[in-house]
Image (cartoon, rainbow, N blue to C red):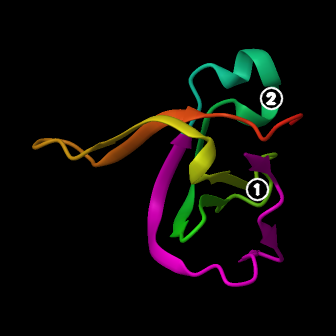
Amino acid sequence: MSINQAHFQNGLLLYQGEQIVNHSKNVTLSFDDASRQYGEVFRGKHKGKIFVTTHRMIFLNDDQRDNLQSFAIAFMYMKNLLVEQPLFGANYISGIAASHPNG
């Protein structure tokens, strides 16, 4: 998991050999428990774009004044991943994002 490391001048930074598999606009990112433990950057709802690559999932914020500009999580650090497609609601992904070792 990294914060504000996957963007540059409103664009997306990819690793060498990493490819975008899917992307979506108008995505809302929120954190349940992180705001209490890790501070202001995780508070509230963040609206932007999400990119699913061959290595990780990356969120880019649309609001340039927000403290959280980008959020990236490698698939190997995701736990309890749940992809839901409810009949009468918006699709969503939920899970636990663990930090990198010593992160």
Quarter of image, res 9: bottom right
Q: In the rendered structure, which amino acid carries the disc numbered 1?
A: Gln
**What is the quadrant of the N terminus in the image?**
top right
Q: In the rendered structure, which amino acid carries the disc numbered 2?
A: Glu
Residue 10 position, x and y percent, is 75, 75
Do the residues bearing badges 1 and 2 touch, measured as CB atoms within 8 Å?
Answer: no
**In the orientation shown, which residue stands out farthest toward the top?**
36
Quarter of image, res 56: bottom right
Q: Residue at x 20, y 42 (%)?
A: 89
Tell me the tag on residue 69: 1
Between residues 66 and 3, which one lies in front from this camera angle?
3
**SS category of the residue bearing label 2:** helix
Examine the structure image and report whether residue 67 is included in the region drawn in magenta.
no
Q: Residue at x 76, y 56 (%)?
A: 69
Q: Residue at x 80, y 24 (%)?
A: 38
Tell me the tag on residue 44: none
Q: What separation in Å lies between label 1 and label 2 (alpha carbons)?
A: 13 Å
Residue 16 position, x and y percent, is 75, 83
Residue 5 position, x and y percent, is 83, 60
**What is the quadrant of the C terminus in the image?**
top right
Q: Of label 1 and label 2, which has the lower sequence position? A: 2
Side of 42 relative to 101 (left or right) = left
Q: Which residues are magenta?
A: 1-29
Compared to 19, does 48 lie above or below? Answer: above
Examine the structure image and report whether residue 23 is included in the region drawn in magenta.
yes
Between residues 59 and 65, which one lies in front from this camera angle?
59
Residue 24 position, x and y percent, is 44, 68
**In the orientation shown, which residue stands out farthest toward the left?**
87
Compared to 91, does 22 lie above or below? Answer: below
How packed mark 1 is, by other alpha carbons closer than 10 Å (few <14, some 14-19, many 20 or more), is many
Side of 51 relative to 15 (left or right) = left
Name the residue that disc number 2 marks: 40
